[in-house]
Amino acid sequence: MSIAGTRPRAAWAADPARSRGRLHPEPRSPSRNEFRRDCDRLIHCTAFRRLKHKTQVFVSHEGDHYRTRLTHTLEVTQIARALARGLGLDEDLAEALALAHDLGHPPFGHAGERALDQCMAAFGGFDHNAHSLEIVTRLERRYAEFDGLNLTWETLEGIAKHNGPLIDAGGRPTARYRARGVPEAFLDYSRAHDLELASYASAEAQAAAIADDIAYDAHDLDDGLRAEMFAFDQIASLPLVSDFLAELRGRFPNLERPRLANELTRRLIARMIEDVVAETGRRATALALGSVDDVRYAGQTLVGFSAGLAAADRAIKDFLTPHLYRHARVMERMEQGGRVVSDLFRHFMQNAAELPAEWRLDGADERTRARRIADFIAGMTDRFALDQHRRFFASTPGLR
């Protein structure tokens, strides 16, 4: 299936003209559709700007060319739009969901999230997807008439459910949340603005989710090669990678490492996008989809890899786990970052008066205070977290 140009709108695409609207009604814009407005609000919000100084894999001082949480988000957004274009979906909604997908990450990447989750174990835990929803519905304070960004139902649905339903038809948490239950943020918001947590999200949300996987695979290989944590010969046997490297070395035998890495990265992304478009089209035809609600109640994920590409995706992730994410260099820095997060949480729990004035809740019970402190820490950039740590501790790691 060709993905060149813009395909006609699919019958099962989301339509901004038929949006279920916003929790707080607003006049329509004369120049922008509802999903475009969501994109613009996300780009201009404070939490989006903070992604510039949040870790993806490497902390910022290790080099200017490594991905940050912001550049990763922009790359996911480009891939999500390419998928939406190839499938005839709404590009603005796919973009909005890609822009929002990592807003809830605390400092120091997944290590910071694990540390904050452990700190919050007695208070419901911490989940970055749930925190993303809290940011856009409660924590951003930019508008006179409401807290949050007042995004459309479709964007909020996608933030909550881009990885699939949160509960089953009987209201029981799905596998992801079976052990500890669905995070309170999803349940609380759904009581006011029902996100239908037992259904799948739109195809646009699913496209944003798999765009994240594609970006991780290609760009983490690129960053790992740049950091010399592994060499081309170590990835030469991986599915897809092996074919592309053989082609590139045959055509360009003297190509320098940076160009070789870039050529590999762009081929991986293009091939994965093409596969998702073809496989998703096949599934849509088999399911005889006629509307966006058909996607929600299809009982299965619509947007995905073929079996062969799913195996290649798994093989790449299986390689990256020990060679990049758990590499000694990365682990040392992430352990240090996690300790910063844990130290700050414990300090503020014991010294709530040292929180900034706008974050204090005088007289709050322990659970409410813990959630407030977690919200404050989750919003920190890496460098702000380190600056805060230096205020209270003499042993701040040299992560800059």
Image: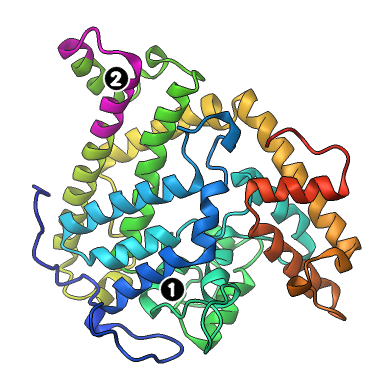
Is residue 257 toward the left or the right of residue 119 in the image? left
Q: Residue furthest right?
A: 350
Q: Is residue 8 above or below residue 77?
A: below
What kind of element bears circle 1? helix
Name the residue type under label 1. Leu
Name the residue type under label 2. Leu
Majority secondary structure in the magenta region: helix
Q: Is residue 210 above or below residue 34?
A: above
Q: Please tell me whether mark 2 or mark 1 is closer to you in this view.
A: 2
Q: Quadrant of the C terminus?
A: top right
**Is residue 152 visible to the viewer in this orientation of the structure?**
yes
Q: Position of residue 139 (x, y in %)?
A: 60, 73
What kind of element bears circle 2? helix
State the extent of the magenta-drawn residues as a range: 249-267
* Residue at horizontal 31 percent and vertical 73 percent from the top: 35
Q: Residues within 10 Å of mark 1 (few under 14, many from 20)?
A: many
Is residue 134 toward the left or the right of residue 220 in the image? right
* Residue at horizontal 54 percent and vertical 62 percent from the top: 47
The question of residue 261 being in magenta is answered with yes
Which numbered disc, 2 or 1, marks the residue that appears first in the sequence? 1
Residue 285 in which image quadrant = bottom left
Residue 181 in which image quadrant = bottom right
Q: Is residue 23 above or below residue 148?
A: below
Viewer-closest of 153 and 341? 341
* Residue at horizontal 80 percent and vertical 56 percent from the top: 345
Q: Position of residue 239 (x, y in %)?
A: 31, 26
Which residue has dot 2 on it? 260
- The tag on residue 371 is none
Which residue has dot 1 on it? 156
Between marks 2 and 1, how big is the CA–CA gap?
Answer: 40 Å
Say whether marks 2 and 1 touch (CB < 8 Å).
no
